Amino acid sequence: EARESGNEGGSGKSEKRLVWQNSWGLTTRTIGVMVLVHGDDKGLVLPPRVAPIQVVIVPVLYTKTKEMVLEEASKLKDSLLNAGLRVHLDDSTNHNPGWKYNYYELKGVPLRIEIGPRDIEEKKVVIKRRLSGSKAKKVSWADLSTVVHSELKEIHNEMYQRAKADRDSRLRKVTTWDDFKKALNEKCMILAPWCGEKAAEELIKQKTKEMGSEVFETAEGEEVCEMSGAAKTLCIPFEQDDIPEGTLCISAGIDGFPKKAAKMWVMFGRSY
């Protein structure tokens, strides 16, 4: 790739050399995975650490108390901004609070703060997580910054644990070709022993492609995605389990392929 683009760099001496480069395709793929893994039927669910807006303040406005509520809401916004949070105050008047609740849930804002005349009397606000299953609760103004930071940390941890549990439920560790094929047909990722040779991976790609493609459909029967059926290596995990002595590569014996010793555990999955 560097040779084709003429991408050269200095080596510390006078001559220039072609650079070593690669492409992980990280940016858009990461965004897509985030949407698919965390989103729900209400829309996006954004992790607090990457959410453009971490907290949205929605004032409950009535004609007689409108100015008072907006003034106090603005003060809360400033205090949260000073606490290092990314905050948005929706002081628009063309939509009611219920519409705004749904709108910011659709956009995946992690935490919502509601403030109205009664909350001002009590010196409290209502906070509500975007994460499904959570209940609203009241928090005093004095404790708000501390509580919001704590809530966002808890949201991050809960989202991570949910995603990890979902990933782990779809991961199978196998050492035989029959178990490999079974796990693949169960729509799982596979952790398998591998000899590290390209020929072994190419054989696995070919044999799994022969198993046929797989079509994913919605509950209504609408086709949304077709997997090619071919499995390929996804990654070599940094944390490697011990490989028992005598463990063979997952490709060993397939169509007479040489039985080579496994050198590492590798994650396999279907292409799409």
Image: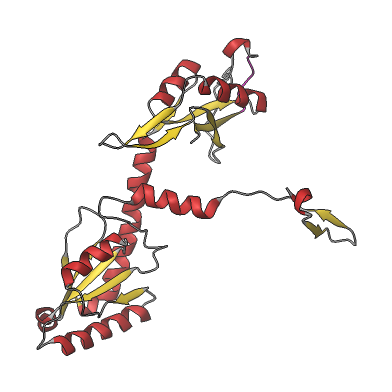
Classify 62 as above or below 215: below
User: In the figure, is residue 146 to the left or right of 238?
Assistant: left
The residue shown at (41%, 20%) is 182
Residue at the extreme right of the image, as rendered: 14
User: In the figure, is residue 15 to the left or right of 144?
Assistant: right
Of 90 and 134, which appears nearest the observer?
90
Of 82 and 16, which appears nearest the observer?
16
Residue 181, percent from left and from top? 45, 20
Q: How many marks?
A: 0
The residue shown at (19%, 67%) is 99
The residue shown at (55%, 25%) is 193
Would residue 259 be visible to someone looking at this image? yes
Would residue 197 be visible to someone looking at this image? no
Classify 263 as above or below 95: above
User: In the figure, is residue 220 to the left or right of 261?
Assistant: left
Of 91 and 73, which appears nearest the observer?
91
The residue shown at (26%, 69%) is 147
Residue at the extreme top of the image, as rendered: 256
Quarter of the rendering containing residue 105: bottom left
Residue 72, percent from left and from top? 21, 86
Of 162 and 238, which appears nearest the observer?
162
Does 91 lie within the magenta span? no
Q: How is the image coloured?
A: secondary structure
- Extent of the magenta region: 259-263
Quarter of the rendering containing residue 167: top left
* Magenta region, main secondary structure: loop
Quarter of the rendering containing residue 139: bottom left
Classify 151 as above or below 194: below
Classify 179 as above or below 19: above
Residue 70, percent from left and from top? 21, 85
Residue 198, percent from left and from top? 66, 28
